[in-house]
């Protein structure tokens, strides 16, 4: 960003209206600019063709648009696309387009690095550099949508906050980005097509519930036994399962939205009948479903996916207890774009 210039996307529509008014111009010019920025996702003032050349020059003199740029784009043999995205300060995050026969899902990042310490996640090996701004999250969605249109001739069907970072530790900016993505003056996507995935921070889940948000919530659970969860997610010592459960019950009470538990089964860690029964008992206490996820190995540990018969036992016993369960096979493993593998390599 040039010295003396301001980031125009940090301005509200009302503030842009006021800017033009202060310059002796019609205030509705601000609304037009806002539409170019958030509905059409333009990255330069010259593209704002319903503004006069004088108005565009005025904007260039006062503002910058700090848009992201694709630094590296990688395509998997299964159609998954991973973007290494360069930010205006040259830091990099990764975002992923995950296509299936009928859907295109955008997996977006919310932080540069991560402050949590999950042992199975490559992003946890990076220190947290900073939170992403709302426009940087929004730009990832716009970029992935353009790639979906180009490669699959369809727009995005879903957005998941499952990339780099813990979304609830960038609470304000994540909610502001979702507002830009869902509101009519933004991209106008339905919030019901958005899932925010958290490692489980009870205080922030309470706050989300009180906000009356309409998007879906997923929790990276991986064990319903506190001692096991602390081994694989050491930060969980600060957030006991009973506190997490209480916050999720409150979430459902306020939103009536069922929670998804994301769960990887590892050999020698959470592959016993006791682990399955603990998960069943946890799920029975709050309306929820379980998404079993294939493990994607990372260099920094020796954890292994449990045997197929163990995963089958999870599915069989969860189903017998009337708990909805799905098994998600990883996509983009050959380009390290799968769940838990994003680390800016």
Image: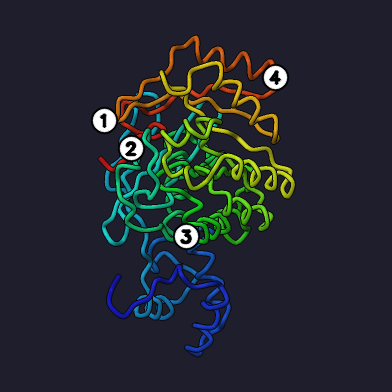
The residue tagged 4 is 321
Lower sequence index among marks 1 and 4? 1
The span from disc 1 to disc 2 (Cα, nearest Å) is: 8 Å
Q: Residues within 10 Å of mark 4 (few under 14, many from 20)?
A: few
Mark 1, mark 4: which one is toward the viewer? 4
Name the mark on residue 122. 2
Element type at mark 2: helix
The residue tagged 1 is 299
Mark 4, mark 2: which one is toward the viewer? 4
Residue at point 57% right, 39% down?
A: 241
Lower sequence index among marks 3 and 4? 3
Residue at point 61% right, 41% down?
A: 242
**Residue 265 position in % (x across, y down):** 47, 22
> Where's the N terminus, which quadrant?
bottom left
Q: Do the residues labelled 1 and 2 touch (CB within 8 Å)?
A: yes
**Residue 181 position in % (x across, y down):** 55, 54
**Residue 86 position in % (x across, y down):** 30, 53
Mark 2, mark 3: which one is toward the viewer? 2
Name the mark on residue 96. none
The span from disc 3 to disc 4 (Cα, nearest Å) is: 41 Å
Residue at point 69% right, 36% down?
A: 286
Q: Are marks 3 and 4 in contact (CB under 8 Å)?
A: no
Which is more toward the observer, 59 or 7?
7
Marker count (numbered): 4
**Residue 168 position in % (x across, y down):** 51, 52
Q: Residues within 10 Å of mark 3 (few under 14, many from 20)?
A: many
Is 223 above or below relative to 213?
above
The span from disc 4 to disc 2 (Cα, nearest Å) is: 34 Å
Name the mark on residue 134. 3
Position of 257 with respect to 100 (left or right) is: right
């Amino acid at each position: 960003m040039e010295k003396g210039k301001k980031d125009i996307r940090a301005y509200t529509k009302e503030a842009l209206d006021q800017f033009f008014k202060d310059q002796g111009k019609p205030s509705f010019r601000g609304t037009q600019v806002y539409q170019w920025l958030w509905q059409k996702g333009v990255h330069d003032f010259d593209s704002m063709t319903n503004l006069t050349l004088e108005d565009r020059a005025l904007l260039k003199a006062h503002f910058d648009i700090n848009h992201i740029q694709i630094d590296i784009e990688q395509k998997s043999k299964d159609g998954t696309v991973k973007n290494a995205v360069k930010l205006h300060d040259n830091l990099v995050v990764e975002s992923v387009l995950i296509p299936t026969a009928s859907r295109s899902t955008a997996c977006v990042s919310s932080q540069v690095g991560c402050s949590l310490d999950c042992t199975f996640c490559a992003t946890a090996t990076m220190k947290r550099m900073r939170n992403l701004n709302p426009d940087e999250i929004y730009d990832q969605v716009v970029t992935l949508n353009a790639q979906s249109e180009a490669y699959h001739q369809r727009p995005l069907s879903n957005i998941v906050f499952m990339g780099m970072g813990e979304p609830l530790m960038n609470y304000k900016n994540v909610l502001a980005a979702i507002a830009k993505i869902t509101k009519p003056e933004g991209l106008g996507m339905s919030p019901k097509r958005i899932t925010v995935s958290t490692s489980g921070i009870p205080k922030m889940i309470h706050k989300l519930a009180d906000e009356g948000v309409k998007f879906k919530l997923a929790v990276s659970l991986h064990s319903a036994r506190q001692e096991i969860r602390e081994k694989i997610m050491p930060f969980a010592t600060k957030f006991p399962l009973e506190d997490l459960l209480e916050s999720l019950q409150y979430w459902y009470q306020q939103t009536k939205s069922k929670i998804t538990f994301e769960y990887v089964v590892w050999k020698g860690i959470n592959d016993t009948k006791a682990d399955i029964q603990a998960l069943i008992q946890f799920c029975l206490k709050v309306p929820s479903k379980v998404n079993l996820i294939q493990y994607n190995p990372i260099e920094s540990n020796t954890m292994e996916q449990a045997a197929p018969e163990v995963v089958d036992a999870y599915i069989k016993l969860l189903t017998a207890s009337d708990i909805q369960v799905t098994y998600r096979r990883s996509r983009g493993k050959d380009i390290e774009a799968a769940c838990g593998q994003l680390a800016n390599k």
